Image (cartoon, helix red, strand yellow):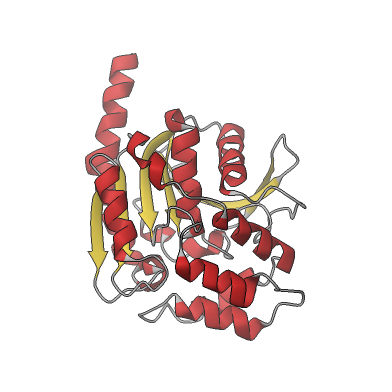
Amino acid sequence: MTPRTIALPSGVTLEYVEHGDPHGLPVVCLHGWPDSWRSYETMLPHLPARLRAIAPSHRGFGGSSRLATGYRPADLAADLRAFMDALGILRAVVVGHSMGSIVALRFAVDFPERVAGLGLIGALTGLRDHAVGRELWEQAVRDLADPIDPGFVRDFQESTLALPAPAGFVDTIVAESLKAPARVWRAAFEGMLGEELGGALGGIAAPTFIMWGDQDGLADREIQERLASRIAGAKLVIYRGCGHSPQWERPDRIAADLAAFIAADVAEGVSRRTRSAA
């Protein structure tokens, strides 16, 4: 997969990759903090070729432009809408991991007409009331400065795993994380600290698939069950032995389950709406 860039009307330039059929059902995959599109690098090839899988890097991360402001989940959701507009995508399945799940939920709340389905991995509804997140902020992120210590980055990324990632993958993620300056790490984390979407979940009508590793030390089971109970019809699948990043640990399994969800719960609904519109 060769990264491309696209300039948005806001002045943001986003890096992204595509995989699969350019005319297929769009599946947009949003990475977590402080990763990049490469968070999905080992998963995308396992998705069916009939899908149009797209993975952008959020503003500030990977090869995307590093603006001074605009790192709240609402800002990143607005970027996603503009990104979809620029690619000519009316509706998509939006997949989000960790911070990306917060952005995906915010997108579903703010722009429900653009969401064909939701896939949430290691999901969070925000960090405003999240003890682990606030502790991480106070102990490590609030005072983070350049140059960021690669050892700190590696320790954090490895802490999200309970099973081994593919060979060399953590090295890649560490290198990608180090592309973002400390101010972006802080701003994006502070944006999550200001967000809590739990009260808005009942308004989400899109088919939703929740994927959670039972060894996840950042997003606990209570959050996943709250998501499953408050979003009508949401499905929760638990991956035994996986941590916060099961798409790194079991990319084949996550891709297969996501594809099955899309085929069963999303694609038929899209097909029915298309026939109705015709």
Nearer-the-camera pick, 263 or 221? 221
Nearer-the-camera pick, 5 or 158? 158
Q: Residue at x 61, y 34 (%)?
A: 86
Tell me where residue 66 appears, x and y as whole percent: 74, 55
Tell me where residue 118 appears, x and y as whole percent: 37, 44
Q: Residue at x 50, y 59 (%)?
A: 127
Q: Is residue 205 visible?
A: yes
If the image is split into quadrants, where does the C terminus sit?
top left
Q: Residue at x 69, y 61 (%)?
A: 184
Q: Is residue 30 above or below residue 41?
A: above
Tell me where residue 158 appears, x and y as whole percent: 48, 80
Query: Residue 210 vs residue 264: left or right?
Result: right
Quarter of the image for residue 266 reads: top left
Tell me where residue 145 appears, x and y as whole percent: 75, 74
Q: Is residue 224 above or below residue 277?
A: below
Q: Is residue 83 above or below residue 209?
A: above
If the image is split into quadrants, where does the N terminus sit?
bottom right
Q: What count of labels does the image hold?
A: 0
Farthest bottom residue?
151
Nearer-the-camera pick, 5 or 205? 205
Q: Is residue 49 visible?
A: no
Q: Residue at x 55, y 59 (%)?
A: 37
Quarter of the image for residue 60 reads: bottom right
Farthest top residue?
278
